[in-house]
Every structure is written in C-alpha cells, then in structure tokens.
Image (cartoon, rainbow, N blue to C red):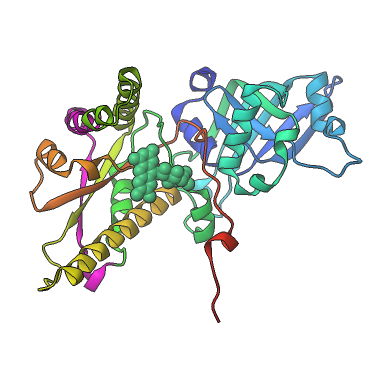
Amino acid sequence: MKATPNVLTQEQTAFLVRRRVAHLATADEAGRPHGVPVCFACAPAAIYIALDEKPKDVPVSHLKRVRNILENPNVALVADRYAEDWSLLAFVMVRGHAELLDPETEEHGAAVRLLRGKYHQYETMRIEENPVIAIRPEKAASWGALDEPESSEPQVLDTIHGRRSVRRYLPKEVKEGVVEQVLEAARWAPSPHGRQPWRFAVIRNGETKERLADAMGEEWRTNLQMDGQDVGVVEKRLEGSRRRLLDAPVLVLLCLYLEDLDVYPDAGRQRGETTMAVQSLGAAAQNALLTAYDLGLDAGWMCAPLFCPEKVVEALGLDPTLVPHALLTLGYAEGDPPKRRPRRPLDELVVYRD
Ligand SMILES: Cc1cc2nc3c(=O)[nH]c(=O)nc-3n(C[C@H](O)[C@H](O)[C@H](O)COP(=O)(O)O)c2cc1C
C-alpha cells in the first residue's frame, strides 16, 4: 500500500487529505468527458469515493461515472481551495486508474471505514452495499499555495466534526508559528479561578523523543506483563507506540501545575480543586486539537504519561512540580485514519428535565 507517497509529494498529500470535496473526471470509450463533485477519502495507495444510496430506479451501475470507469478506467480527480484572497488559491490534480471495489472485498470494508471516519453523514447511509470507486494514482500535478493555513473563517461545528485522532504522519515539517497558535488556543482554555493549572512542553528533537519513548515504554512493558499479556503482543504494542512518538513531527506534553490552586483543610474540597484542574487540562487539550485541525494540522492524544509521570519528568528534565497528563502528537496526516469511532446519538446521552 505505498503507491501514493511515490506519486504525490508530501505537500500534495497533506493538501488533498484535508479537502472535503473534489471533482472526479471520467470519460467514456469515445473520450467524451464527464465531471462530478465527490466526497473522498485518502489511503497511502488509493483514493476512495463512495457511491451513495440512490432511489431504486437508478442502480449505481447506471451512473455515468460508473459506466465510464467500466469502459475506460483513466480518471482525474481535482481538489482545490478557493478564497477571495487569491494568494490562497491552490489545487491538486491526480490522474490514475479507477476500479470498482466489490463489497465482498477487504479493501472495500477498509474504504467504507475511511469514508465514514471522514464524513459522519455516511454513518447512516448504506454505502457498504454499493461498490466503492478506488483510484490508483499514477501522476499528480498541483499549483498555488498548498501550504497556507486553512480557512480563516472556520465554523466551529464543522471543525468539531472534522477533527479526528491521527496516528500516522507524513515526515513533513510543522512550522513553529503554527505550533505557537495551537499553544495560544490552549492558553485560552477555561480554568478554575482563571489560574491556568497547566504547563506545556514542546518536543521536536529525535533524541528527546527517544528518551521519552524509552521511559514510557519501560513502564508500559511492566504493566502489560503484569496483565499477563503474551510477550509477542507486548513487544508489538510497544513498537507501535514508540513509532507513533518518533514519527510525529511535534509532541506537546500537557502537564498539570497545581501550585497556584486554592488549599483547603478538608480532603473533599481539595479533591474537587484537583478535579477542576484536570477538567481544565482537558479543555486546553481540546482547544489545541481543534485549532490544530483548523490550521490544517492533525493531532492525536496519548494517555501514556499519566501512568508514569515521574519518569516523564525525569526523562525530559522538567520541574518536579509538573504532573504530566497527556501527550498530543501534531503533524500532517499520512492519509485519512483507518477507523473512527462513531458517536452515540444524542437521545442516548441526554435527558431533559423540565
Ligand atoms: C483522555 C483521553 C486519552 C486518550 N488516550 C489515547 C491513547 O493513549 N492512545 C490513542 O491512540 N488514543 C487515545 N485517545 C484518543 C481516543 O481513542 C479517540 O479520541 C477516540 O477513539 C475517538 O476518536 P476520534 O478522536 O478520531 O474522534 C485518548 C482520548 C482521550 C480523551
């Protein structure tokens, strides 16, 4: 599954992965062109397009794009950014061979998961019953400001729906200014008494990441062995977690800092004070994740520091008053994440009491 990285540059991949809509051009046997807007998801070796549910009288095999692909598999897909500020204009065009994935195949299942992860609207549509179009990229071309930050007028709910946990990144540099904006968002999180009971450590250096991975890995190995996990499984999970840390271009460690909080004579109120600080750290993390997404970055959350805070403090040479809680990975997604957990509907989560 390694075709796309060879065909698309990192900038092109990062740009394409973040588009919500593209245009698919197909042609029939005689070369007569046809174009439609499409939702799509990216994997390292393919770009996937669902065939939505249709009224019964239009089977998907009658769709013009499907008939064209069967007659002539050469296709092009173009995704662009338009803005009134023309210094932000950009597009990527991918040419390749298209095929229709049979619903029985493993790749079809993986493609449907990718598409549902990217577009929550697909969760309630029976796209798994139809073939999925897979484009195998052969050539890519692009133009314009691919690397510019995304829209300056984001809709908050769109950002919330779009954000997802990413666990594999392109080896593409993340500019310092962008990381600073992510931290700026975290700084503005609500906090108990406005005391901001958190501090952040930013890690980019490979050796520092390795020290951190070693420290956390040691603790995790002990815990997994204590759980009686198979040696092979333990090593595989540790290796996966280590790779996540080393491959992410930037790590942001969120630490609790409790020194400025109120002190109470009773344990109950003191616990409440600490809980508020933890809640606030979660708010800072979410601010950071949403801002990262708005800026065209992706992010992931790792809870590992929570289970060995002292080791993390030691490995990074941090002030001992800091309590590491969460690690955010930041970078540009290699592709759309393979799975994303669907959400429970609101009526399972909410009760109304008049
Ligand atoms: C407190 C917390 C801890 C998490 N820890 C991890 C973790 O250690 N590893 C991981 O891969 N994801 C971790 N996640 C991410 C969740 O798995 C992810 O948010 C969830 O599956 C929903 O997927 P989405 O973020 O793509 O919507 C954590 C999330 C939270 C809020």
Q: Position of residue 236 (x, y in %)?
A: 34, 21
Residue sitting nearer the eye, 20 or 139: 20
Residue 103 visible, this orientation: yes
Q: Residue at x 62, y 23 (%)?
A: 107
Q: Residue furthest right?
A: 57
| Residue 212 colored in magenta in the image | yes
Note whether residue 148 is visible.
no
Quadrant containing ligand 1 reads top left
26 and 113: which is toward the camera: 113
Q: Position of residue 284 (x, y in %)?
A: 31, 57
Q: Is residue 235 left or right of residue 65?
A: left
Quarter occupied by residue 143: top right
- Residue displayed at 68% across by 48% down: 124
Please tell me which residue lies in front, 353 or 131. 353
Question: Residue 285 in magenta?
Answer: no
Write down the quadrant of residue 94 in the picture. Answer: top right
Residue, x 52% and y 59% (percent of image)?
157
Which residue lies at the image location 79% right of the left edge and 31% below the top edge?
Answer: 65
Outermost residue on the bottom side: it is 354
Magenta stretch bounds = 191-220
Is residue 188 shown left or right of residue 91?
left
Instruction: Report the number of discs.
Output: 0
Residue 240 against residue 289 in the figure, above or below? above
Magenta region, main secondary structure: helix
Q: Is residue 253 left or right of residue 71?
A: left
The percent coordinates of residue 79 (x first, y second) are 61, 38
Residue 269 position, x and y percent, is 19, 72
Compared with residue 206, is residue 292 higher up or lower down, i.e. above or below? below
In the rendered image, the quadrant that contains the C terminus is bottom right
